[in-house]
Amino acid sequence: MREGIIFIVSGPSGSGKTTLTKRVTRVIDNLRFSVSYTTRRPRPGEIDGVDYRFISKEQFENMVQNGRFVEWATVHGNLYGTPTEELERAKSSGVDLILDIDVQGARSIKDRYGSGVYIFITPSSVGALKDRLVERKEGMADITKRLENARKEIEEIRLYDYIIINNSIDEAVENLASVIRAERCKRERIIESLKDGFWNDR
């Protein structure tokens, strides 16, 4: 059995990365969305355990103390964390996992694991990003803060293996799916299983 691939997707708030990661799991088999923990309040339409696992700050801090996160960070005043057990389970089961996390979290995973496929999602301009934040009815103070964070995040773009410009959601989903399919076909990912099984089916 091959080891599951970890796909790490980041991008500025408003870039559409959450929509992309959710939609690509519907068109790619054997790919699961990693559900992070957060202390922020659910947004309208979000479901606990599907979009995020919503917990209190005290519960989150207890999980940090018990070493249950592969990475965690404070983003826009809220805590977010990726559970270690989910990554380990995916890698050992051969199921690919896609994570929607910020640049801080991506760097933490890269420092800890080294492996993984790193994908950055961005609109084509700061104007397009601002328009999306306005459409989400963010307050002007929040928009200013998120645009400043976006500038810092884009400065970290060299951490990533792929960049997808999200001007059209359908095109961006297909580009993300193409990256996943291509990574699954890389020589180093399949050569050992091919060698082990090639001559057995005779």
Image (spheres, rainbow, N blue to C red):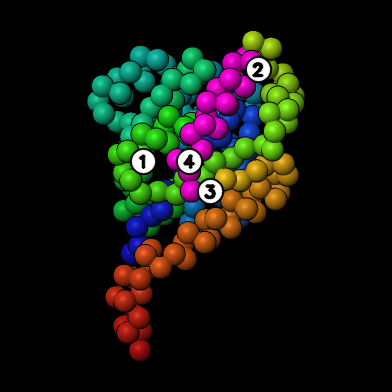
Quarter of the N terminus within the rendering: bottom left
Q: Which mark is residue 110?
A: 1
Q: Which residue sits at x=36%, y=38%?
A: 109
Alpha-carbon span between mark 3 and mark 4: 9 Å
Alpha-carbon span between mark 4 and mark 1: 13 Å
Q: Which residue is mark 4?
A: 158
Q: Secondary structure at mark 4?
A: helix
Q: Which residue sits at x=35%, y=81%?
A: 198
Alpha-carbon span between mark 3 and mark 2: 26 Å
Q: Which residue is mark 3?
A: 162
Q: Quadrant of residue 192?
A: bottom left
Binning the other alpha carbons within 10 Å of mark 3 as few (below 14), some (14 to 19) or many (20 upward) gives some
- The answer to the question of whether label 4 and label 1 lie on touching residues, with beta carbons closer than 8 A, is no
Whole-percent x, y for residue 4 in the image: 38, 55
Binning the other alpha carbons within 10 Å of mark 2 as few (below 14), some (14 to 19) or many (20 upward) gives many
Q: Amino acid at mark 1?
A: Lys
- The answer to the question of whether label 2 and label 1 lie on touching residues, with beta carbons closer than 8 A, is no
Q: Amino acid at mark 4?
A: Arg
Pick whichever of labels 3 and 2 is earlier in the sequence. Answer: 2
Q: Which residue is mark 2?
A: 143
Alpha-carbon span between mark 3 and mark 1: 15 Å
Q: Amino acid at mark 3?
A: Tyr
Pair 3/2: label in front: 3
**In this picture, is 43 found above or below 93?**
above
Quarter of the C terminus within the rendering: bottom left
Whole-percent x, y for residue 62 in the image: 30, 19
